[in-house]
Image (cartoon, grey):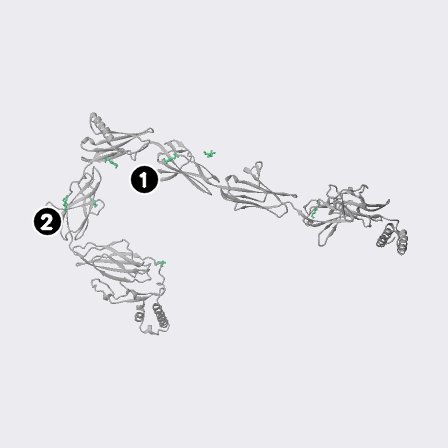
Amino acid sequence: MFPSSVSAQIDRLCSTAHASRCKKGGKVIVLKMATLILSVVCVLFIRGCSACFNYDDNKSMSIATGNTYYQECICNETGYGIQNLEWRDKDDNVISAGPGTDSNIYLEYQGDRVNLHIENISKTMSGTYKCITKFEGQQYAQNFDIEAYEPLIFHNAPKTQYLLEGSDSRIDCIARGDSEPIINWEKGVDKPIEIKSGEKYQLTPQGLIVKNVTVKDGGTYKCAASVIQTGEQADRFINVQVLTVPVIKNINAMPEATVGEGESLTLECIVEPMPEPEYIWRKIENNNENSSQILNETTNIIVFNNVSINDSGIYECIVQNKAGNATRKIEVTVLQMPKIIDFKNRTEVEGTNITIICNATGHPEPNITISAIKRDDYEDGEYVVIIPPDWQVEHTYQGSIVCEATNEMGSDVKEMYLEVLHKPYFNKLVKFEWGWTGKTVNLSCAHKSNPPAEIVWRYHGNDIRTEEQVEINKNLLEMLSSAKDHYLPIIIDKNFSYGIYECEAKNEIGAVTKTVTLKQGFVPPEITNASIIDLTATSVLFSIEEPKGLTGPDIVGFTAEYDKAENYNITNIHNNRTWGLERPFKLEKLKPNTKYQIKFAAQNAVGTGPWGETLEFITLKKSAPEPPVWDLDFVETSSACDQVIKWKIPEDNGEPIDMYTLRYCTVHNITYERICVEENVEKTTHLELRDLECNTTYSVELVAHNAIGNSTVASISFVTPVNTTEESESILPAGVIIGIAVVVVILCIVLLDLILYFWKKQGILATCCCKNNKKTKNTTLNSRDKKGLLRDNCESTDDSLKRPNKGHKEYEYNKTTGIITGKHSAV
Ligand SMILES: *[C@@H]1O[C@H](CO)[C@@H](O)[C@H](O)[C@H]1NC(C)=O
Ligand SMILES: *[C@@H]1O[C@H](CO)[C@@H](O)[C@H](O)[C@H]1NC(C)=O
Ligand SMILES: *[C@@H]1O[C@H](CO)[C@@H](O)[C@H](O)[C@H]1NC(C)=O
Ligand SMILES: *[C@@H]1O[C@H](CO)[C@@H](O)[C@H](O)[C@H]1NC(C)=O
Ligand SMILES: *[C@@H]1O[C@H](CO)[C@@H](O)[C@H](O)[C@H]1NC(C)=O
Ligand SMILES: *[C@@H]1O[C@H](CO)[C@@H](O)[C@H](O)[C@H]1NC(C)=O
Ligand SMILES: *[C@@H]1O[C@H](CO)[C@@H](O)[C@H](O)[C@H]1NC(C)=O
């Protein structure tokens, strides 16, 4: 046969020839001749005249189901139209449906052609579809053999799949095609390895079974499907991850598993990284596995924004995937501030045993302390006492009872009032009172009682008749009605006012009686023993002994009447003086060298007792004053280390004091020498000592002077404070340093001289050993003597001070301190 293109060419030529023969008939001989020849040729090749087309044709094709099929059928012979075309379906039925019909198969007319549409090819639509044209009994057909086949599709081959570690598990990959596809497996992308059934793998229609999965089995797998019949093939890349059994590393509690009520808490279940974990949270109540509760959380975190006491408990995090699950527990403790919920006022009868209840909430359970203040009736004391359970109530605890509930979160304190019903209590059940005519004695029946007590006074006279007794008691009752606040005023006017008074206080709980004995009091007896213990020119000091045999209130003081002996018998008006018991019994401003007479009497609340014997004494002659007495009151000074010293004016012993002489010296350890300063002051009783060294002991000596002479020495010593701000003092002035240097050089020379002296009996020392020290050291004096400490005593105008070393000084150098000090050998 011809190749199809040539055959088509001939076809076209022939149809042209045929058409001209059939329609127009021969008119031109030449043309007829040509046509004849062509016809002959054509007859040789073509069977005869056609319609729209004048040949048969067969085409076959495979089409995947679900696709659309479209085929044109052209009517290209002149003189024919599409009415000469006919499509037949696979069952040889004429297809007539047009576009827009419900039919799956329809025709579309378009110019010179009729097109077949099959919208959605299914397997059953396979068959031969024909486009037919007819002419004069002649029929030509173009056959289109359509074979519908199922396309190659993956079923159940997810692109991400999981294998379970340690087990045999399958990677699913099912493909379906028109016929059973062949499936090949590969692992890896860059260097794919073909997988064959064997020890490790098993190929099944459902997929690839991987045996004894390890982590290494993860990766990308290729499931390649192919259908030989249709030549179709498809690849599916599957990302395979290996699922391991979940591992919980920890449950983190933030900030802590122990939180205070109202705080926030976050529990986080920390899991080894893994795909698709599923979280379940469980709360186990009261440590009881059976009473657990699944929480609503599905993530690895639980957040409590406002923790309540009910959130305490054990929380369990359960993590699971297909490979298994893991659980872990954490205990959450919610701390709660103590809160006292029950602590009420109570009223109890004294002597009963009670337990005071203080009920408090809180977690951990709070410690409860119940305390009360005990107020003692007899002593002025208040004690805090812890109240135990089963406690016997005492009236001294009436008042506030405090409950304190404490745990690590804090404490709560509440107070209640305990009222104790008790019998009356007196401070003292037996009392004595002194009375005397004219005095009003205020008898007391003051007591404590709850509820308030009724009181009744009774009187037992000393040696009085019963009638009198009854009468008095009647009066007492009347007085009681006017008496306020349990006090009974007794105006002593009669003898029988004295005696025993009884006060009975009584309430529901009990009755108590107090006895007051009212006795007659007298003035003190005569003083029998008064003696002189100190006598000066102008004063006298007595010792007075209280007289014995007192019947009455205590002695409160003494009175004395005195005068010069020469006046005593001339007049009745004498000097008098009264002392309280606490004062020194001293008379001042007496005349020197004079004879006096004096008598004493004791005094108490009743009055002054009788005078004792008259005493005689003679004051001393005028003399030097008494030594001053130090006044130790502290006085602030401008400089921290300076001191003000004060004293009291002493007895002048007949001549006025005109001057005080004060001398104060430093007191060091034995190794140091003393520095002394001396001052004379007039008409003053205090002196500020300036420029004192800090942290140094000073001894002070003070002498009073009058026209007759000096008093004895009054001494005192004190330590100056440590100067905290002292800095510059420790740094020696440049002059001192130069002075020290000079002294050191001189000392070296002296040492050298000494060595020379002992070794060779040569040098200055050898010739004159006793004179050289003093002269050389005088040069350094001025640098140190700023305070005038080394002032020559000759300047002092006071010749009366018998001081040695007048006009003579020595200086000493101390090696360790570098201080040069004046050396007063008098000290
Ligand atoms: C699974 O693999 C592990 C380690 O590769 C091996 O120790 C174990 O014996 C294997 N188990 C089975 C059942 O093959
Ligand atoms: C304390 O109070 C709670 C709650 O009201 C109650 O259950 C408990 O019995 C009380 N305890 C005492 C000792 O009263
Ligand atoms: C408890 O007693 C106190 C003192 O008497 C009183 O102020 C308070 O009101 C009382 N409280 C109650 C609840 O009765
Ligand atoms: C008795 O003494 C009390 C307390 O000292 C006082 O309140 C009262 O007024 C006195 N009564 C008389 C009558 O003096
Ligand atoms: C008198 O008092 C002095 C001093 O207090 C005492 O030594 C002397 O014994 C007393 N004499 C009599 C008789 O009490
Ligand atoms: C005590 O002396 C003063 C005057 O010095 C005089 O007025 C007074 O009456 C005297 N008292 C007695 C109790 O002598
Ligand atoms: C004060 O003097 C004492 C004895 O002289 C000495 O032990 C002490 O250290 C001194 N204190 C100060 C602060 O200088």
Along the horizontal axis of the image, is 645 left or right of 588? right
In the displayed orientation, state which residue is furthest to the front: 27
Instruction: Establish whether ligand 6 lies closer than 8 Å to the Cβ of label 2.
Output: no
**How many marks are shown on the rendered structure?**
2
- The answer to whether 561 is drawn above or below residue 636 in the figure is above
In the displayed orientation, state which residue is furthest to the top: 467
Dot 1 falls on a residue whose secondary structure is: loop
Dot 2 falls on a residue whose secondary structure is: helix
For image coordinates 19% across by 56% down, the residue present is: 625
Residue type at the position of mark 2: Glu
The quarter of the rendering in which ligand 5 is drawn is: top left
Instruction: Establish whether ligand 4 lies closer than 8 Å to the Cβ of label 1.
Output: no
**Residue 660: image location, x then y, percent:** 22, 59
Along the horizontal axis of the image, is 820 left or right of 574? right
* Mark carried by residue 799: none
**Residue 651: image location, x then y, percent:** 19, 54
Which one is in front, 87 or 174? Answer: 87
- How far apart marks 2 and 1 lie (CA) works out to 57 Å
**Residue 54: image location, x then y, percent:** 85, 49
Which one is in front, 56 or 90? Answer: 56
* Mark carried by residue 566: 2
Q: Quadrant of residue 118?
A: top right
Q: Quadrant of residue 764?
A: bottom left
Identify residue for label 1. Answer: 380
For image coordinates 23% across by 66% down, the residue present is: 795
Which one is in front, 255 or 226? Answer: 226
Residue type at the position of mark 1: Asp
Q: Residues within 10 Å of mark 1 (few under 14, many from 20)?
A: few
Q: Residues within 10 Å of mark 2 (few under 14, many from 20)?
A: few
- Quarter of the image containing the C terminus? bottom left
Which one is in front, 670 or 585? Answer: 585
